[in-house]
Each structure stands twice: as C-alpha cells, then as structure tokens.
Amino acid sequence: MELTLSINQIAKVIAANGADKTYIVEGPMGSGKSSIPKIVEAMYGDKYNYITVDCTQLDVGDIQVPDTDRTQMVTRYLPNVLFVGDGTKPMFINLDEIGKAPRSVQNALLPVALEHRVGVRPLPHGSVVMGATNLGAEGVGDLFQPHARNRVSFLEMRYPTNEEWVNDWAIEHGVHHAMLAWAMETPELFRSFKDVADPKDNPFIFHPREQRKSFVTPRSLYLASLELRDEQRDAVGDKQATLAAIAGNIGARAALDLMAFVDLADKLPAWDLIVNAPDSAPVPDKSPAAMMMTVHRAISRVERETIDPVMTYIKRMPKELQCVFTKRVLGIRSKSGTIATHRGFSQWVAQNHWLLK
C-alpha cells in the first residue's frame, strides 16, 4: 500500500516536526515540491530565514571551505553564509533536487540535513532542513545511498487533483480561465503514471515507458497558460504559433484539446461589458462549458471594486454556478478578506448559506 500526501499535508508535517528530524520529499516532476517553503512561510510568516538551494548546481566548495589555523596547525571547515543566515532566527533550508546531486555533494550535505551544522558551525536553534527530489521510478537519476535513506524520513507527494490545483493554486496565480475550465473538465491531466498501465491510456502525462518530449504536469500547465495572456497572444498574432508554443510545454495532443477551450473563451462576453452592463451582458446559457468558463474568469478577475456588478451578473446564472463562484472566491486568501465583507457578497452568502455546506 502506498501512502502519498498532498503538498499542504506535507508542509504541515514538516512545519510541525522539521526541527527534530529531516524529511526528504519525493514526488513526481512538476508537482510543486519546490514551493513547500512558500506554503510554510504562509503558515508561519517570517519565523524563519527561508532559502532554497539547487543541489545540482553545487560543488563541495559551495557548502564549506577549509580554513587553516597555522598557529594551532589545524584546519576547520567554515560554512557558506547562505546556509546559516545572520543568526537572528532559525533557517528553513530546502535542499532542492538533492537526489540528483553528485555523491560528493550529497555526502557534504549530510551534516547539514542530519546534524544541522555546516562545517564547524551549527545552524540556529530551531532550524528546519528538508530535501526535495523526484521519484526514483521516473528514471531521471534521483538516487540515495542506503545509509542516507535510513537516517531521514521520506514523504511521497502526489499530484494535486484537478480541483485542488484550480481552487488552491491556479486561480490565485492568475492562470487563464480557459486553462481552468479545461483542467476542471479533464481530471486525467493530474494522474500519475503509476496508475496507468499502458501509456496509450493517458496521452497527456509523463510515462517512463514512452518517450514524450513534452507532457502535462502542474508546472507545465502554468507555463502553457502564460501563452494565453491577451497581451501575449496579441503580440504573437498567430494562432498556429501560439498552439506550437503551448505544445512545447504540454505536448501536441494536450495543446489541441486546450485550444478548443480557448476558442470557446474567445466567444464569451467581454469582461468590460459584464462590469459596465451586468443586467444586459449576454449569459452564454446555451453552453454549460461556456458558463463555467465565464464563472472561472469572474473568480480570477473580480476585485472589491467590481464585486457589485459581477454579483449582479452571476445571479443571472443557475444557482449551482452562483455557489461555485461564491465558494471559490471565499477560498482565495487574496480575495476573501476584502470581498467577503462586501455588502452585496455577504448578503448572498447569508441568504444562501445552506447551499455552501
């Protein structure tokens, strides 16, 4: 039985126990392992000095350097200041891609991870050291020696579900509404190759048994979404070029599927029309996909200044889509604090609170 955790579960485990033991997070490529320190920072603020070190770019001399004391005829190893900070508060060190580091670098980092010291200098009290690496089964060179594996605690991180990615990350990071709608309609984008016996059963994702130049991960979805920004598409001015650029991130099959949603998004009522004429702006009620995409765009773009007309427009949609809009806005930290207290929004919540349970 495999025990895998979400990124938020892993961040909580490391934040709770990381000062007493060292965790190595193994997870599929592009799943967001490197963002764990940011999640911890959102939980604890400036409790730590946060650093992420790309271990594949390190040499042993980047970790510690010898300093010879000729009066006592001894050599001590002094740390790179990157690892110890200014000493005013504990460190939160993420040893990223540690499984791909040369063995000499891994060995030099063992005292950092296991003893919380660099050379002769201990890390500040309460410091946390974690590592992040890809799954060994992916066959991309992530290896640990048995003696090292037995001294740390390994946590396996899973991909987010499509709903987790959209609601917990993508909306808040400005992912294009066509991408949001496609992700919600295509849960297989977030499957692991370990759940797919035949690579042909899922043409979108990485599979070690079939070489694919580009494939879907949460990271590559975000990169593909950058090609969909209005200013980007206007500057390119060529749908075929945009398609090719997206395929370079997520593969040709996925790019073609996504562009079908983009074509639909291009036919939605203009955002300015919704904000300036919410009572008369057309509602795409002949297409459930178009309505859902309109809701996703509203979730992404609504601000306190526009919540009144947006709520007026959203109320013209079916009640279940009104609930989708409200629940997801409430779930976005950057929006909920300012919008949830707005009169028009809070009135809808009060009148329909039973629908939100």
Image: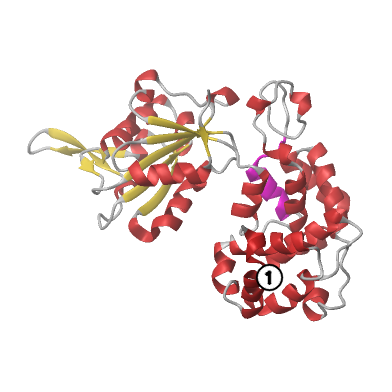
Left or right of 108 on screen, residue 166:
right
Where 240 falls versus 113 (above or below)?
Answer: below
Task: State the image coordinates of residue 31 (x, y, percent, origin top left).
Answer: 58, 40
Task: State the image coordinates of residue 210 (x, y, percent, origin top left).
Answer: 72, 23
Left or right of 134 on screen, residue 322:
right
**Residue position marked by numbered label 1 in the rendering:** 302
Q: Residue at x 51, y 27 (%)?
A: 142
Residue 4 visible in the picture: yes
Q: Residue at x 66, y 40 (%)?
A: 217
Where 222 falls versus 331 (above or below)?
Answer: above
Q: In the structure shown, which secondary structural element does the residue marked by tag 1 occupy?
A: loop
Where 90 falls versus 72 (above or below)?
Answer: below
| Residue 225 part of the magenta-drawn span | yes
Is most of the magenta stretch helix, strand or loop? helix
Left or right of 157 on screen, residue 275:
right
Magenta range:
214-226
Residue 328 visible in the picture: no
Q: Quadrant of the C terminus?
A: bottom right
| Residue 210 part of the magenta-drawn span | no
As drawn, the residue found furthest toward the front would be 354
Would you identify the image quadrant in which residue 314 lies?
A: bottom right
Would you identify the image quadrant in which residue 226 lies?
A: bottom right
Q: Residue at x 24, y 41 (%)?
A: 78
Disc 1 marks a residue whose amino acid type is Val
Q: Residue at x 36, y 30 (%)?
A: 152
Where 327 falls versus 151 (above or below)?
Answer: below
Which residue is at the front of the view, 22 or 287?
287
Task: State the image coordinates of residue 100 (x, y, percent, origin top left).
Answer: 49, 30
Task: State the image coordinates of residue 355 (x, y, percent, origin top left).
Answer: 67, 61
Would you identify the image quadrant in which residue 268 lies?
A: bottom right
As drawn, the residue found furthest toward the left would be 71
